[in-house]
Image (cartoon, grey):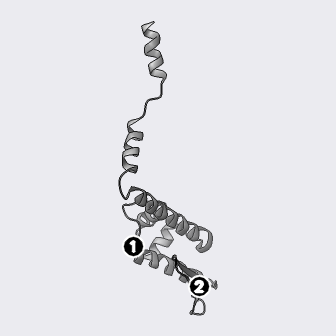
Amino acid sequence: MSSRRSDDRRKKPATSSAEAVGKRLSSLAGFADGVARRERIIQLGALLKRLREEEVEVTQSEAAAAIGINQSELSRIESGHGERGPSYQTITNIIDTYSNIMRERGAQVLLTLEIKSDHHRKRYQLSAFDDDLQMSES
């Protein structure tokens, strides 16, 4: 009978140490904000990768060379890896480079920036084709 009891104890799911660590971390101040920030970095990387593959239609190596960064750095950005994510300057360089490549092919590039707060919403549009900056508020 004692062997049966020990078998029963083995069958019970035990809380793993990873789960315990996860619970402790999630209770720390700022942890949820950090997780949300990481998710935004991953989403940004996925968006940049999709833009490169589907619209700009260049390889990662070709894009990195045109941007002026290493292919491994562009891979890190697109996958969302790294401690902090790309700097504003790096993102700007990527978008400018992709816009220039597409413009050289005769495509009209329209970039949109939306700023939303509790009190207002602003939308800025920049058409790289005709250098027209439009601003609308709603």
Q: Position of residue 101 (x, y in %)?
A: 55, 80
Q: Residue 88 is drawn in which quadrant?
A: bottom left
Which label is found at residue 16? none
Q: Position of residue 69 (x, y in %)?
A: 41, 72
**Nearer to the camera, 29 or 107:** 29
Asked if residue 118 is positioned above or below residue 131 in the image, the reply reads: above
> Which residue is found at the position 52% from the left and 63% from the top?
43
The residue wearing badge 2 is 103
Which amino acid lies under the numbered mark 2 shown in the image of this protein?
Arg
Q: Position of residue 111 (x, y in %)?
A: 57, 82
> Which residue is found at the position 45% from the left and 65% from the top?
77
> Which residue is found at the position 58% from the left and 71% from the top?
51
Q: Residue 67 is drawn in which quadrant?
A: bottom left
Between the C-alphas of marks 1 and 2, the distance is 24 Å
Left or right, residue 128 beside residue 5: right
Q: Position of residue 36 (x, y in %)?
A: 46, 60
How many marks on residues?
2
Left or right, residue 137 beside residue 27: right
Question: Which residue is farthest top?
Answer: 1
State which mark lies toward you, 1 or 2.
1
Residue 130: in sight, yes or no?
A: yes
The residue wearing badge 1 is 87
User: Circle 1: is it few (<14), some (14-19), or many (20+) Cα within 10 Å?
Assistant: few
Element type at mark 2: helix
Asked if residue 5 is positioned above or below residue 76 in the image, the reply reads: above
User: Circle 2: is it few (<14), some (14-19), or many (20+) Cα within 10 Å?
Assistant: some
Residue 78: in sight, yes or no?
A: no
